[in-house]
Amino acid sequence: MTTPATRTEVVDAADQSRMRPLPLKIHPHPDETTRSFLHRLETANALHPGQLRKTLRRARRPWIETLAAWTGDNPQVLSLAMPQLRQRNETAVPRSKLVGRPDRTILGTACRHCALARGAGRYVEIYTTHERVICPRHGLWIGDGIQGFTDQLPILACPDIIAAWHHHKNLITRHSRSRVRKAFHISSVINWRWYDQFHHFTHAIEIYDALAADQPRHSQSQAMVAASLYPSIVSLTATIASPFWARIAHSRHPNAFLDRISDEVTDGWQPRGAFDSLRHWMDTDWQPTFKGADIVGSPGSTRYGLRPRPLPQLTAERHMQQGLNCGKSH
Ligand SMILES: [Zn+2]
């Protein structure tokens, strides 16, 4: 005679059935978000959107174990590939393996060509670092202004953007990731406000013209404007990140700092008045307040851990409608 299954046995059986491998297995792209990975897993297995997430929430075990059972991947591999899983399962990867690694805290998209080459399709959402704005291998802009893979625009027509990216990385080596990330944020806010006020300066306009001639399909896109401003943003970042120049900027005699900015960024123009964004920074020394770390810290460090928080959207919706006014200088 069979006895009726207890509630615990029924729940355990349901939990076990949730651990069955999926027919089609995919592997995570480096730094992929769990949202993106689940979406790709559902698409590959012809499942309803959100079905796997619902199952993960019902399962009475850590997500990483269920994902490993579905995909056949080692939990350590999943944990190394997906920053969110690392945060929830610190035991899966020894922290010492990650110490010194730049922490990924900004939402972005992987280069569509790199994603395709890895068999991950064209659209993969990732956590990234602030300086990963281009794919140097495929010459694509993947920084600010990118919503989907179709927004990723070729920038090989503008060597200045690639040169600026190398400069950006060198700044991180020279001044530290934390300092450059803050300076880059400040510089981005200042440059976008200049763009708002008078469509920026000659260098950005020339880059925009070259990009628009090469890629007319993307003209007036937010990504193209962002790519055009990037070299100017990096130039100003270099000065703001330098302790020497920052000290002069906040001193009572900032003329040498202003001369440098007018030579390198603003076509000889010197910002004046309390309402100018650069003068405002010089007067107040405002700093961005990022949550989370820039670098994974040593065991016991409170700086360890992902605090997903994308950079504030520096570019308003209207940038997409406006584009850069090519024929207009300040
Ligand atoms: Zn690529």
Image: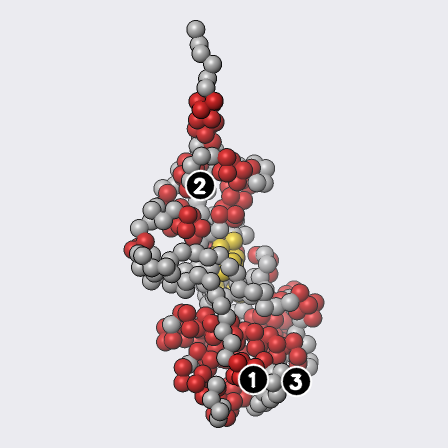
Q: Which numbered disc, 2 or 1, marks the residue that appears first in the sequence? A: 2
CA–CA distance in space, label 3 to label 2: 54 Å
CA–CA distance in space, label 1 to label 3: 18 Å
Identify which amino acid the numbered label 3 is placed on: His
Q: Label 3: which residue?
A: 330
Q: Which numbered disc, 3 or 2, marks the residue that appears first in the sequence? A: 2
The structure residue drawn at horizontal position 41% and vertical position 60%, both measured from the top left corner, is 103
Considering depth in this image, is 316 or 330 the residue closer to the camera? 316
Mark 2 crowd level (few <14, some 14–19, many ≥20, 10 Å Cα): some
The structure residue drawn at horizontal position 39% and vertical position 41%, both measured from the top left corner, is 73
Where's residue 268, x and y in %? Answer: 57, 90
Q: Label 2: which residue?
A: 63
Q: Label 1: which residue?
A: 279
Q: Nearer the viewer, mark 2 or mark 1?
A: 1
CA–CA distance in space, label 2 to label 1: 49 Å
Identify which amino acid the numbered label 1 is placed on: Arg
Q: Which mark is residue 80?
A: none
Mark 3 crowd level (few <14, some 14–19, many ≥20, 10 Å Cα): few
Q: If the image is split into quadrants, where does the C terminus sit? A: bottom right
Q: Residue furthest top?
A: 1
* Relative vertical location of residue 237 with respect to residue 310 in this rendering, above or below: below
Q: If the image is split into quadrants, where does the N terminus sit? A: top left
The structure residue drawn at horizontal position 52% and vertical position 89%, both measured from the top left corner, is 258
Where's residue 324, x and y in %? Answer: 66, 74
